[in-house]
Image (tube, rainbow, N blue to C red):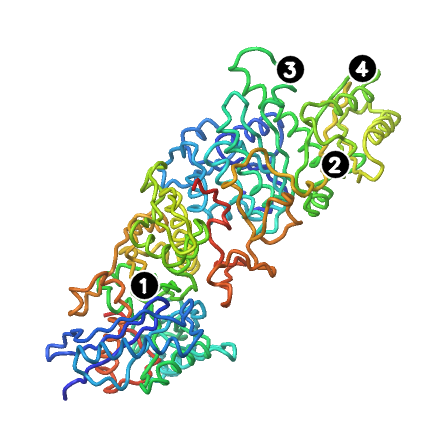
Amino acid sequence: MAIPPIAALEIGTTQTIALVGEMDDARRVTITGRGVYKTTGVRKGQIIDVELAKVGVVRAVQQASEESEVDVGRLLLAASGGHIESKVNRGSVPVRARDQIVSHEDVEEVIELAQAVNLPSDRDIMHTVTQSFGLDDQTGIMKPEGLHGAQLSLDMLVIHALRNRIDNLRKVVQSVELNVDDVVFSGLCAALATLTTEQKRAGVVVIDLGGGTTSYLAYADNVIACAGSFGVGGDHVTNDLTQAFNLPTARAEELKRSDGHALVGAATGLKRLAIPQDLGFQERSISLKAFHVVINARLAETLRLVRSALLEAGALSKLGAGVVFTGGGAAMPGLTELGRAIFGVPCQIGEPCNVSGLDAVENPAAYATVAGLVLYGFKTYQETGIIRPFKEFIQGFFRR
Amino acid sequence: MNDAIVSMMLVGVGGGGCRLASAAVRTFDGELAAIGFDSDAVATRGIGNMRCMILGAKRFDGHGTGGDPVKGRSAAQDDAEAVAAALAGVRLAVVVTALGGGVGNGATPLVLNTLRNAGAHTLCLATLPFAFEGRERLTQAERALPLIEEASDGLVVLPLDQLYAVAGAHETLADAMPQAEAVFSAALTLFWRLVTTPGFIALDAESLLAVLAQGRGRCRLAVASAAGAARATEAVARLCRSPLLGKAPPLQEVQAITLGVLAGGDLRLAELSEISKHMQAALARGCEWRMGTVLDERYAGSIHLVALLFDGPRQPGARLPEPAAEETFDAAGGSLAGDLRPAARRPRGRTGGRLQGRGRFKDVEATLINGEDLDRPTYLRLGIVLDR
């Protein structure tokens, strides 16, 4: 049976991106339709105006639909935002058999127990990801079935989010008569699109620098060690520049893209940046070094937030394959050097490598989340035969 | 040191701060918990009597910051966790920094904030460069003062010229720094001994904590000593004339004083009364008064006075000396121009109803992490001065 095309949508803070992907017989995924439209009505990944936000959704989906010649009626939706958090929950059960050989039932029971996490009433689980099993004092077991032991434990990474924020995202899409099959954490998607099996084995963190949010997902010891999102992104860089140099937002955004740099030492103290006259703003010049200082301060702070989260999860020292940056913010010159200084490991820009059809786009890293979401759709379809909310991922799904 | 609960610690920041702290440890000749933070591995190598931590080694490879405060701050930020771990458990810290350089200017506010976040109270002793080092260096040093004042519970600003004047040296240029260091370490030693040695009239770390917990802001440190028959009266007179007090404000305007008397077993009760009487006469009637004594045979035959004077808040409109118009900045969301004295231990960066500086995020839910409102520009929260 042919696998149907899959549509994916990300309502970002600065742009809404829709992609349509198709899988061929050799199971290669190609993006056949792409739609991008400027977002309004979204701040820090959260919907603040449904009517404004849905304009971007309609235009982006329409564009992708026309380009791919696929009639998009349902899609997958990416979510990010400071409300998305993760925690590791441990379940533990005694091995039931007299000979103390772990059975399939023991494994199922411990999975059920590890998934039973107590969350505040306003939060929902987005994903649960199996990390590793433990048997008595032995840890790091991937397949415990058939092994000998008395007590079986399981560490489960639970990614959870505020229910109303996810519902609001759904509401925007549903209001334009599209069905949402699933809402997926953007960090997971970016990792799916950009990371190789070797990187996951060696340990790696993917940091998705969006307009209003920064999401991360780290692999350590070949399992997803931690994931989360902060309500800080490229918009904050622009806002800082706006305030530091008394610039209109559009001008600050434009200058950020044309002359921004993540490192302070990129310009000498003498070089000036010409600011043409703008509506209500006088013509003048500003120090390029000071401009970079403002950008550097914000980006360094954001990366340090991720670093602290990795440190807390014990993943910081296990990043053998370094850091991979995705998202629109990854285009900032000097970002990898700044990342190296902060994380102490090699950093690179991650472009979607597990999918084709995005070679010609400018800044492919900005498409990593949506491309990963398309891949996610095909993976769930292959595993379950349907594209439906698939909240439980037993080990292996994200390891390959 | 990390594992133990250290109630009181001397912390040196930057090359000058580490050198001054090391000199104090040497002079103290006793158990004094101390640590230094600097980016320059070569400079700290010469300090053998206390632990020194190299900041920003990944970024600067153990070299100095070339006097750049941005680099100094980056170095401290890179190793923020290590700094926090090294200072864990400290309840009262005396932070010594020599302003005007990269790490002193850039890292001191971060070290103070780390201590504050850990619940410690801080007294910061900051030296200003000699006048002969040039106006630019002095201006750079002064730029850091509002940030340090905001982050510390008490700030003593000690111009090196004043320390040198106390030494009374009129010899070579090469003598200037050692002389100033000697005066500083002697003052700090007296202060440390006063707080850590049980005395007849106790002034321990807890008393000092109580004083600092009120968030006094700027204060002054002065020392004086005298020997002979009229040593009590003479010591008070010398203290009141001490160059360390500077010219203003006059003693009559001091709001609170913590006075330590260090002497040998020969200290007479009458002498103590005399010191108290003369000192209180020099101060205003409502001045808050705390006194402690330490009897130590090392001081036999003489009386040493060490005073921490807390001035009142600055008058509205008061400003730091000659800040360039574009260099005044808002480190806490409001204008610093009106009142340079910070509120008592106010949590920096918290919204507290002040939404200034949030720009386009003013109408959306704030991104609050570790009590900081991350929607406010980072450069403002870090107090980065922009040469626009």
- Which amino acid is tagged 2? Pro
Residue at which label 4 appears: B228
Nearest to viewer (mark 1 / mark 3): 3
Q: Quadrant of the C terminus of chain B?
A: top left
Which residue occupies the foreground of this view, B88 or B221?
Answer: B221
The answer to whether marks 2 and 1 sit on the same chain is: no
Subunit ID for the residue under disc 3 = B
The residue shown at (64%, 50%) is B345
What number of labels is visible?
4
- Which amino acid is tagged 3? Gly
Nearest to viewer (mark 2 / mark 1): 1
Mark 4 element type: loop
- The answer to whether mark 2 and mark 3 are in CB contact below 8 A is no
Nearest to viewer (mark 4 / mark 3): 3
Nearest to viewer (mark 4 / mark 2): 4
Residue A94 appearing in the image: no
The residue shown at (72%, 32%) is B249
